[in-house]
Image (spheres, grey):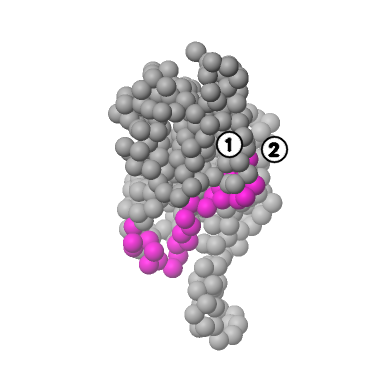
Amino acid sequence: MPAVHATDPTRSRLKVTVTRRLPEAVETRMSELFDVSLNTDDRKMSRDELVAAMRVSDVLVPTITDQIDATMLAQAGDRLKLIANYGAGVDHIDVHSARQRGILVSNTPGVVTEDTADVVMALILGVTRRLPEGMAEMQAGRWHGWSPTAHLGGRLGGRRLGILGMGRIGQAVARRANVFGMQVHYHNRRRLRPEVEAELQATYWESLDQMLARMDIVSVNAPHTPSTFHLLNARRLKLMKPSAVVINTSRGEVIDENALTRMLRAGEIAGAGLDVFEHGHEINPRLRELPNVVLLPHMGSATIEGRIEMGEKVIINIKTFADGHRPPDLVVPSML
């Protein structure tokens, strides 16, 4: 791999294009180290704008909102050598095509683990304890005092939580669920080591179908890959108990959103807490109408600390590459 050296006297600093507005501290540090083009308006770039940026950049720093496919990469030219993604998920980038063209792809793993796991628990509590319904009643001025039968939700302690995808975030969710007294179960491509299972007090299910049929709450923490698209399809959703709740903070494409909406409306699933959606920000309008659904605008990783740490990882990946080494968070096709 021909390295591009920022300190090479025959060449100016690396040209880096950032596609969205990042925290000020991150943008400032990038500007000190590289020749950076920033998106000060934070407007989503079009396909043509992304291609134009790739043609004149050594490094592109995209986010989840930027779809980078094989056709775009074919038009990128020879200058682009690194796509330093601002985020852990890279399903919006055609990594295979990039590698075939000699373009490396890096990401920012591990940064959003704790923040996303916190939001999983917030969604579980929000749905099972009917918190948004209570908030709406208070904000509308409809509350007329305490009643012994009003706003009755369910207790978390003793409930079975099924975690679909036991990576970093899934394990962080398991640790939190244990504190709440929940029974942790999981399904994963690979079973965890016995000592990790023991630490997490987690029961492994080889059969996803069998796990779904027995859980009170299912948390989707699997990445979006061809094999996980609609992993929770209509058939699998129908296996769940009518009293069960679905939580999704990973990728919307893992769940058949239309099937989920139909079942929620029909009372075949008790509730859902969703931070991600199958078609990005275009949400099924019927989901918004349901009182037993908590919807968030992809806030799972939205903490100040997390966003800055993500930026620091991007900078380290670019600087390491500029110094002639493999980025520490290099994404290879075998990981996908």
Q: Earlier in the sequence, mark 1 or mark 2?
A: 1
Q: Is residue 162 visible?
A: no
Q: Secondary structure at mark 2?
A: helix
Q: Is residue 34 magenta?
A: no
Outermost top residue = 1
On screen, 223 above or below 317? below
Q: Is residue 314 left or right of residue 295?
A: right
Q: Say what amino acid the circle numbered 2 marks.
A: Glu
Q: Residue at x 52, y 83 (%)?
A: 141
Q: Is residue 296 magenta?
A: yes
Structural distance between the alpha carbons of marks 1 and 2: 44 Å
Measured as percent of width and height from the top left, residue 94 is found at: 38, 29
Q: Position of residue 43 (x, y in %)?
A: 42, 49
Most foreground residue, 299 or 321: 321
Q: State left or right for residue 81 relative to residue 179.
A: left
Splitting the image into 4 quarters, where does residue 158 fall?
bottom right
The answer to whether residue 60 of the structure is visible from this angle is yes
Foreground pick, 79 / 200: 79
Residue that badge 1 annotates: 31
Secondary structure of the residue carrying tag 1 is helix
Q: Which residue sits at x=36%, y=33%?
A: 52
Question: For mark 2, what is the residue?
Answer: 199
Q: Which residues are magenta?
A: 284-309
Q: Which mark is residue 70?
A: none
Residue that protrudes farthest toward the left in the picture: 71
Q: Amino acid at mark 1?
A: Ser
Residue at the image point whose x is 45% and y is 65% from the top: 292
Badge 2 crowding class, 10 Å Cα cut-off, few under 14, some 14 to 19, many 20 or more, is: few
- Return the residue nearer the eye: 34 or 314: 34
